[in-house]
Image (spheres, grey):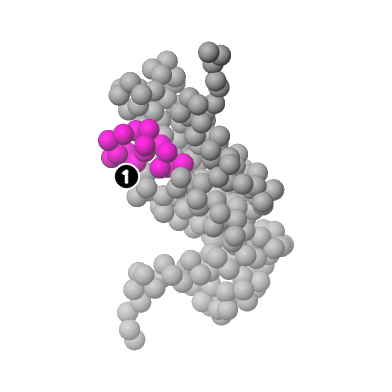
Amino acid sequence: MPKVTEEYIDIRRQQIIDAAYRCFARKGFHQTTMRDIYAEAGLSPGAIYHYFDSKDDIIEASFIFDHQRSLPVLERAVDDPDPMVAIDQLIDFFYAGLESAAALGANRVNIQGWGEALINPRLLSPLRASLFDFREQLSQLVRRGQDAEKIDPDIDPGAAGEIILSTYLGLYLQKAIIPDLDVERYKAVVMALLHGNFSKDDV
């Protein structure tokens, strides 16, 4: 029997996660059954249960996958010599991902997952780890910007990281509720706020 590669395993797991997300987007987390998921994926029950024991397993895996997918981008941002450019690039990355998430219905599903995480410590753990990592990386970039005299030194770096992250999470929620919300228009205003171009002093 040929050896199953890690790449094959990753592809199969992602196929199942994507199928589950389509089901969750249509029917909701609690109304979707494992039978719905293996029918949507076009796989046998055995193939599904080989990778995931439950819907919670699938949601947990998706949270972990989203975090791992962003790590190379975060690492590049930390290494960028210009912290303001790095912050802009992170915003571009996260906001661009919203469009593909919305197309799959993943934003609606993840918001359901956030609600589940509030009462399920197993789901809360990877979600908190992901948010803390994003916040800390953004805070580090703000500190670097302050050291480079590009950001007001009186601004609290931790709070700044939380605010930048909140612009994304707020957009994520709004996009799920208002699918036709224009991400580029939203991003333009966020950039104006970050770069000090929002208010105009009287001449």
Q: Quadrant of the N terminus?
A: bottom left
**Residue 179 percent across, percent down from the top left:** 67, 52
Residue nearest the observer in this picture, 189 or 172: 189
Residue lying at 55% horizontally and 51% vertically, measured from the top left: 98
Residue lying at 40% horizontally and 42% vertically, measured from the top left: 89
**Residue 78 percent across, percent down from the top left:** 32, 38
Q: Is residue 78 magenta?
A: yes
Name the side, left or right, on which 18 lies relative to 80. Answer: right
Which segment did they paint magenta? 77-91
As helix, strand or loop, the secondary structure at mark 1 comes to helix
Q: Quadrant of residue 147?
A: top left
Residue type, mark 1 in image = Arg
User: As displayed, is residue 197 above or below residue 118?
Assistant: above
User: As displayed, is residue 33 above or below residue 94?
Assistant: below
Residue lying at 46% horizontally and 72% vertically, measured from the top left: 12
Q: Main secondary structure of the magenta part?
A: helix
Residue nearest the observer in this picture, 166 or 37: 166
**Residue 189 percent across, percent down from the top left:** 55, 34
